[in-house]
Image (cartoon, helix red, strand yellow):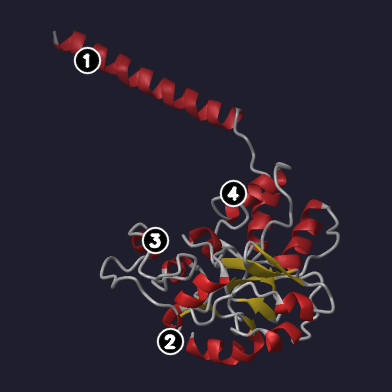
Amino acid sequence: MNQLLGISTMVMGGTGVLFALLLTYTSKKFAVEKDTRIEEIEEVLPGANCGACGYPGCSAYAEAIVQDEASITLCPVGGTNVASQIGGIMGIEVEGANEPLIARIKCDGGKNCTNTFEYRGIQDCHAADALHGGQQSCKYGCLGLGSCVAVCPFGAININENGVAEVDPTKCTGCGVCVKECPKAVIDLVPQNAKVHVLCKNKERGKEVRQKCQVGCIACKICERTCEHDAIKVENNVAKIDYSKCVNCMACVNKCPTKAIKDVSKNEASVCCHS
């Protein structure tokens, strides 16, 4: 009996060793070598893993580039400089560098806007928005509860004294994470050098806007008539700027009766200091 048990044990042990050797041989024989360019591109990428390129992280993006599944210009954080370095690795020339984009909050309501009720729930914009669209009478404005602040991977957003989200242009990389997070869609990516912005997205008629917010766009079209460059139009009751035509002349800023159009460059220094 003991002899039979010993033989069984040896057979099982031998079988195990055989399988181990077989697995080792198979793994080496059929191993897929990782393209060294993937690691080279990973070293070039900023490592923010923000997902702005459309991939889960920098590693996944690098692999997609090597497999010809992604453009080398999808990283807004690294910009043209990183794209050029990746192009060198891949042997691709980068054509026509685009102007860098940064996030802007298209709202200046906050304390300038009336509330319909006092919100005491979870300090999260999505939670507030789920409750009758939030506490503000204007259902298009920033709720000021900081969901964008929480998701920004670069610490580029804060809630200012007016109760509205504010972007630090020196830290913003234009990754777009905050744009996707905002339930009110009041965050846009705009050219970094653009100084003039319409800080309102309310599509209601002027009279209704006036009753809810002191600094909202009332669609009076004075800005349209003032602009000599055809760079601003009122669409769906709110002014919109064509940044390809705007020359930052400030004519619309000076004429806007509600100050919904602002020269944001005047506030850049204070924004940087608050962060």
Residue projecting furthest to the left: 1
Number of marks: 4
Mark 3 neighbour density, 10 Å: few (under 14) some (14–19) many (20 or more): some
Instruction: Measure the C-alpha gap from mark 1 to mark 4.
Output: 51 Å
Q: Which mark is residue 133?
A: 3
What amino acid is at disc 1?
Answer: Gly
What amino acid is at disc 3?
Answer: Gly
Residue drawn at point x = 66 percent, y = 84 percent? 256
Label 4–label 2 contact, CB within 8 A:
no
Image location (x, y in percent) of residue 91: 83, 52
Q: Which residue matches tag 1?
A: 6
Q: Earlier in the sequence, mark 4 or mark 2?
A: 4
Mark 1 neighbour density, 10 Å: few (under 14) some (14–19) many (20 or more): few
Mark 2 residue element: loop
Q: Earlier in the sequence, mark 3 or mark 2?
A: 3
Q: Nearer the viewer, mark 1 or mark 2?
A: 2
Answer left or right for 185 relative to 161: right
What amino acid is at disc 2?
Answer: Glu
Image location (x, y in percent) of residue 175: 60, 64
Mark 4 residue element: helix
What amino acid is at disc 4?
Answer: Ala
Q: Which residue matches tag 2?
A: 161
Label 3–label 2 contact, CB within 8 A:
no
Q: Please name whichever residue, 223 or 184, is drawn nearer the observer in this view of the structure.
A: 223
Q: Please name whichever residue, 170 or 109, is drawn nearer the observer in this view of the structure.
A: 109
Instruction: Measure the C-alpha gap from mark 3 to mark 1.
Output: 75 Å
Mark 1 residue element: helix
Q: Earlier in the sequence, mark 1 or mark 4?
A: 1
Answer left or right for 238 relative to 19: right
Label 1–label 2 contact, CB within 8 A:
no
Q: Nearer the viewer, mark 3 or mark 1?
A: 3
Residue drawn at point x = 60 percent, y = 28 percent? 30
